[in-house]
Image (spheres, rainbow, N blue to C red):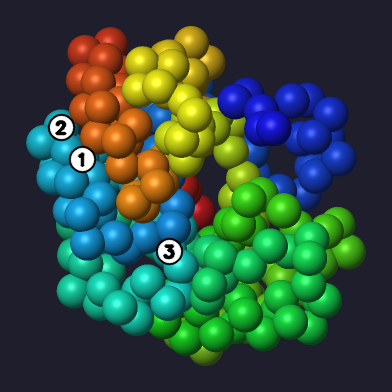
Amino acid sequence: MYFVKAPFWLRFLYRPLLWKVPEKGKVIYLTFDDGPHAQATPFVLDQLKRVGAKASFFCIGKNVDAEKALYERILAEGHRVGNHTQNHLNGWNVSTELYLANIEHAANSIPSSLFRPPYGRIRLKDIAPVKALMGDKAKEKGIQSAVKIVMWDILSGDFDEQLNQEKCLQNILKHTRKGSIVVFHDSAKAWERLEYALPKVLDHYTHLGYQFKVIPD
């Protein structure tokens, strides 16, 4: 089970995390998890370029190591990257020590002050040590931005293989508002729904005068 729209009680419980950007203007924050992926990531980048959109990519360390040219393309085209652990580790199922070691491993390939926990699963007790680790690694790379653990306002459901393409699209169109952080996945599992929904989302909101930006400092 997952929530398309992050419920109030969950946002309250994890209030130190970033769920939505306070935004008065017509701005949406698209994010892409689990890449880089040889098929999905180039498609995403081409679609973003088509409408002049920017986005944030929460990358898995082992995928960055395998697709370094794609990772460099993400950066070269003005998008932002974040740490999504080395191999998509579930923070509820491992010790704090193992979780931090996995994040640190990924940080060697992904210099960033942004972190998103895979599956959105991070224990409350791990928030402070993760932020401290990310801050230390960012400073080593000369990154001065404040550390943010980024969650989401809207989950597209593109990872759900039981979800049809149109329902994935409607999950976004029905719930996205100014400042929404929206999650897609540039992955094989999400490909069928991503390919259908992303161009339509970009065209719909561009027509309405929205801009797509990276997670801000």
Q: Nearer the viewer, mark 2 or mark 3?
A: 3
Label for residue 51? Answer: 2
Give the structural element (helix, strand or loop) at label 2. helix
- Residue 173 versus residue 17 in the image, above or below: above
Q: For residue 26, which quarter of the picture?
A: top left
Residue located at (73% from left, 64% from top): 91
The picture places residue 60, in percent across and down from the top left corner, at 46, 68
Label 1 and label 3: CA atoms lie apart by 17 Å
Which residue is painted at 80% across and 34% down in the image?
A: 10
| Label whose residue precedes the other's in the sequence (2 or 3) | 2
Residue pointed to by mark 1: 48
Residue 59, numbered label: 3
User: How far apart are the two marked residues, 2 and 3, measured between alpha carbons?
Assistant: 23 Å
Amino acid at the residue labelled 3: Cys
Above/below status of 154 relative to 67: above
| Disc 1 to disc 2: CB gap under 8 Å | yes
Which amino acid type corresponds to the residue marked 2 in the rendered image? Val
In the rendered view, tell whether residue 125 sits above or below residue 209. below
- Residue at position x 11%, y 36% in the image: 50
Q: Amino acid at mark 1?
A: Leu
